[in-house]
Image (cartoon, rainbow, N blue to C red):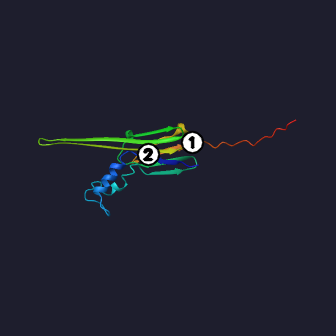
Amino acid sequence: MSLAVSKKRTGRELPLLIDNLFTRPFFGPSLFDLNGLLFENDLALVPSANIIENGKDYEIELAAPGLERKDFKVEVENDTLIVSAEKEEEKKTEDKNYRSREFSYNSFYRTFSLPKNLKVDNINAEYHNGVLKITLPKKEPTISKPIKQIKVN
């Protein structure tokens, strides 16, 4: 049994697409593109995931550099694992002749349909070196008893 993956749109796709039309040339990076080549993948706004099935558990690894543990929210609802993150930053610079104030907001939302053979109460999530690792332990397989026929008298 495997995990099913889905992505949710964040609402930032259209502005990024329009921005791409006016700031990106047909071939190669734009001089106006301050994010460099990373901007190419920015339309997805969803971290890449590795899904690994071991004998005793599943592991999901999400590449999410630049975030902190407190930014993540991991939930299970109706056989669905929901992983989301939000990060807001504000930078202020004040000098005698000028003031600068910059804001940034990044978020993502990703869901995984879970198989029935999981111990949902024992799910573990760890964030280390830009990778969120979620361990989903499997239930012990139940051995079904052979069918016993009952003689009808």
What's the residue at 37%, 52% (across, down)? 43
Residue found farthest to the bottom: 27
Residue 118 badge: 1
Q: Is residue 17 above or below residue 116?
A: below
What amino acid is at disc 1? Answer: Leu
Which of the two residues, 28 or 134, is positioned nearer the viewer here?
A: 28
* Foreground disc of the pair 2, 1: 2
Quadrant the C terminus occupies: top right
- Marks 2/1: CA–CA distance: 24 Å
Secondary structure of the residue carrying tag 2 is: loop
Residue 2 badge: none
Residue annotated with mark 2: 8
Work out whether mark 2 precedes mark 1 in sequence or the reverse, and give the earlier one.
Answer: 2
Tell me the crowding category of disc 1: few under 14, some 14 to 19, or many 20 or more residues within 10 angstroms, Cα based: some
Quadrant in which residue 23 is drawn = bottom left
Which of the two residues, 28 or 69, is positioned nearer the viewer here?
A: 28
In the image, taking residue 24 as reference, residue 134 lies left or right, namely: right
What amino acid is at disc 2? Answer: Lys
In percent of width and height, residue 25 lies at: 29, 61
